[in-house]
Image (cartoon, grey):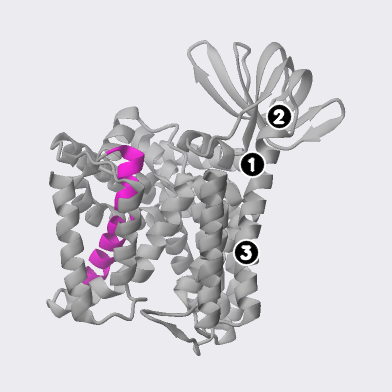
Amino acid sequence: MESAKEGAIKLYNLRYLPLFAAYLILGIFCIKLSYWVAAIVGVVAVLFSLALLFSKSVKWGVALALMLTFCLGFGLSALELHLRNDVGLSGNAQVTCRAIEVEQQGEYYVVTADELKSGGTYYGGKITFITQEKIAVGDDLTIRGEVSIQKLSLESTYSALEYRKGAKYEITPSEVAAKEGTPPVDYTIKEKVRSVLVREQGERAGAFSYAMLFGDTEYMESTDKSAMREVGVAHVFAVSGLHVGVLAAALLFLLRKLRLKDKYNVFIILPLFGFYAYLVGFSPSVLRASFMATLALASSALGERYDDLSAISLAAVLILLVRPLWLFDVSFIMSFLAVLGIASLASPIEKALLRKRVNKKLASGLAFSLSVTVALLPVMTVVFGKISIAGVLLNLVVIPLAAVAYILNLAALLLTLMIPSFGAVLHAVGYIPLFLVELSKKTADLRLTLHYDFSAAEILAYYAVLLFLGKYSLAKKKVKLIVGGMGGGVLLLLLLL
């Protein structure tokens, strides 16, 4: 990880990995801007590199590498956007593929398929279509029709979601022939898990538990999903870094009880993370958490200092080098903002609560929940168009309970799969998700919401203040209190007026 011997730039200690991550992100973001604005941003990035150079904080090689990183980010994102939108199969064609997702809507089936092949050539990306032919997951399909590329729009959250899921093509079929095939391994495993959860917990609780484990809300009741979105706690049924963090902590606890050293634990936990990431579709949050957990274990095994900000930055760099356009995906943004909020704000909040003589465990839980909520506040308003006042408080209860429900569900599920008589335990655990759903519904009924649209400038100002107030800032405590009080007052006025 980073060396402890770091120079200082005004209010912050210099860390190279966050700098490189920032330059890469800035370069990627420029693909969304007009050429003139992107050029201005590029000039500012170069000038900042030169300022670091002349301040003797960095050497020539580092300054040059930062500029190249900016260019790399822009180049990779431009290339990825070109390959995504302009290169591939189009026009009337006959294709073969394998159904991997099937959703029945009335008399129609909405099908997503992979392993796309046409004219002896394999094409990357998944293809979707609608048909009245009965299709099952795993079926081998032969389709004739008009193929088109789903253009990726960087302005659309839905388009970014489809890109992350790998959906690239659409076909309007004139002919569809299906032959029974073998379902994908991940589908088979997840269906087995879902059947056990539904059998032991019932349809409603089982669907919630399944969503928590795999991030798939398809089987949840629409009223449950809408209530949880209404109050801003829908994140609990999306597989996130919280889930992986809880899983890592539980695995590490068990392995250390077996007296295994961390240098061996990393080789056990890493493959398990890889398999779990495969089951949930390699989501940004799971990949980020897996990278960070691996770095933490490796640091412990090697006796090196673990720096969370550098680990977050390295995870972002590794992901964006492979998938640069994930920068515009809400899941990616929320995952990294949440963990940055925890890393930067949780410790100061916990210390403040301890000074007020709050119980240590309670202070730790409240600090964790508050830091996540504060870090995600502007993004939640952009995504959902409003802020649930009750939901902000509800998150303080939901986040720790969701973590408990996740690990208990996972443990009870594994035991039930091995020893069916443990199904009674799994049944009992099902009451936690039911409680969370009912609590969310009661909270949603209160209608305590504020509608506010943060502008880009306000979002930048908001996160600049949070960065200043966090533990990485070297500003004096009194100055932070003044800035925090003023910032909180301005935010409250904006929301109320």
Horizontal and vertical percent position of residue 25 = 53, 58
Residue 346 lies, with reference to residue 376, above or below; the image says below
Q: How many marks?
A: 3
Looking at the image, is mark 3 or mark 1 earlier in the sequence?
Answer: 3
Contact flag, marks 2 and 1 (Cβ < 8 Å): no
Please name the residue shown 30% across and 58% down the image: 462
Task: Give the residues drawn in magenta, as a range.
Answer: 359-385
Q: CA distance from mark 3 to mark 2?
A: 39 Å
Residue type, numbered disc 3: Thr
| Residue 283 seen in this snapshot | no
Q: Secondary structure at mark 3?
A: helix
User: What residue appears at the point 53 percent right and 64 percent down from the top-left corner?
Assistant: 45
Judged from this view, the residue extending furthest toward the right is 120
Look at discs 2 and 1 and give the one toward the viewer: 1
Q: Nearer the viewer, residue 219 or 327?
A: 327
Rendered location of residue 348, percent (x, y): 26, 74
Magenta span: predominant SS is helix
The residue that disc 1 covers is: 81
Q: What residue does disc 3 label?
A: 69
At 62% from the left edge and 49% from the top edge, which residue is drawn? 77
State which tag comes first along the sequence, 3 or 2. 3
Which image quarter holds the C terminus? top left
- The residue tagged 2 is 98
In this rendering, would 303 be left or right of 174?
left
Compared to residue 483, the image places residue 202 above or below, namely: above
